[in-house]
Image (tube, helix red, strand yellow):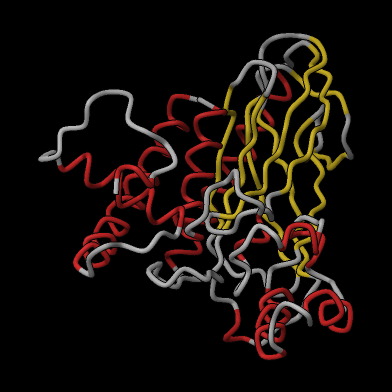
Amino acid sequence: MIDRIRIPFRTQPQFDSPHLKTNLLIQFHLSRLEFPRVDYVTDLKSCLDQIIRIIQALIDLCAYKALLNPCILCINLLQMIVQARWITDPDILTLPHITDRSFIRIFSSYLCQLIDIKHETLIHKLQSHLTSTQINDIYDYLIRLPQIELNYNIRGFWSINEETRQLPTNVHADQEYTLQITLKRLNRIRRNDYRQLTTSTVTKSKDESWIFVLGNTDTGELICIKRFNQIIRSQTTVSLSFVTSNIIGRQRLTLYFLSDGYLGLDQQYDFFIDIESASLQTQINTELDSLVDELDQRLAALQ
């Protein structure tokens, strides 16, 4: 098995080590290689149950340590595990019946560019390579992939009143603001079709879920992270609160909208904020507003 893995061991492998076996199982899973024994498939399923929880814990650790790039890499690893593909592979290989790299020349597109492909176009491209049933499977898979349109603005206190502004804009230093993110699903599908899609035979099915990450790519700082486990059926709004830096001047921030299971559907948005000196009055208004919201929530819980 060792001579078939993509990433070789740097040191002499210890064949009685459970770490070696786990490494082999994961690499075979990501490369979709056939195991020499059926027992390995059972071991892989048990391993996947554990590794997903470990990756989730690593994401939380990266968020706690404010590490942007390691957090993104952990989410990418989670996507790889769910789809049973390497992130360096063309993302069209996650489609059903597309197992050969020769299909790359046929599509010459990324997965996100194929979502709204016409059925007739798909037939024209693949009819000499696949059966009509297989082509229909690919088309059904593509139209069920989530097509999410994202828009955002910023809300907070600039003086006395709370405002919502378009970006880029000026903000106060060391001040809490909220990104108001509007998500709209462009493709309408049946209620029972919101399960996350994968062609892996060993990955467990689950509902679609997403992760928002806000960071500064220039400094490598992860500013905030939020998991969004609700199904995006039509249109919904997500609030992402963060505290601005105490460094005066223009900063570029990056908003990541990441799937926790799909490869090739992530979205990334850069925007600028001009940080001005801190305002005591604005901070007081923000804290009072937060206290009022907390009080309203507690009163609602008592009713």
Nearest the viewer among 144 and 24 is 24
Q: What residue is rendered at 71% in x and 59% in y?
A: 237
**Which quadrant would residue 121 be assigned to in this image?**
bottom right
Question: From the viewer's perspective, is 181 left or right of 197?
Answer: right
Instruction: Measuring from the top left, give residue 145's x and y in whole percent.
Output: 68, 70
Above or below, 198 against 176 in this view is: below
Whole-percent x, y for residue 227 in the image: 53, 51
Q: Residue at x 45, y 53 (%)?
A: 30
Picture layout, residue 89 above or below residue 129 = above
| Among the 4 quarters of the image, the one containing residue 153 | top right
Q: Nearer the viewer, residue 218 or 64?
A: 218
60 in relation to 301, above or below: above
Say left or right for 26 vs 179. Answer: left
Residue projecting furthest to the bottom: 133
Q: Is residue 189 above or below residue 301?
A: below
| Of 300 and 27, the residue lying toward us | 27
Residue 230 position, x and y percent, is 57, 66
Residue positioned 56% across, 28% down in the render? 69
The image position of residue 189, as x and y in percent, is: 70, 83
Residue at 86% in and 23% down: 170
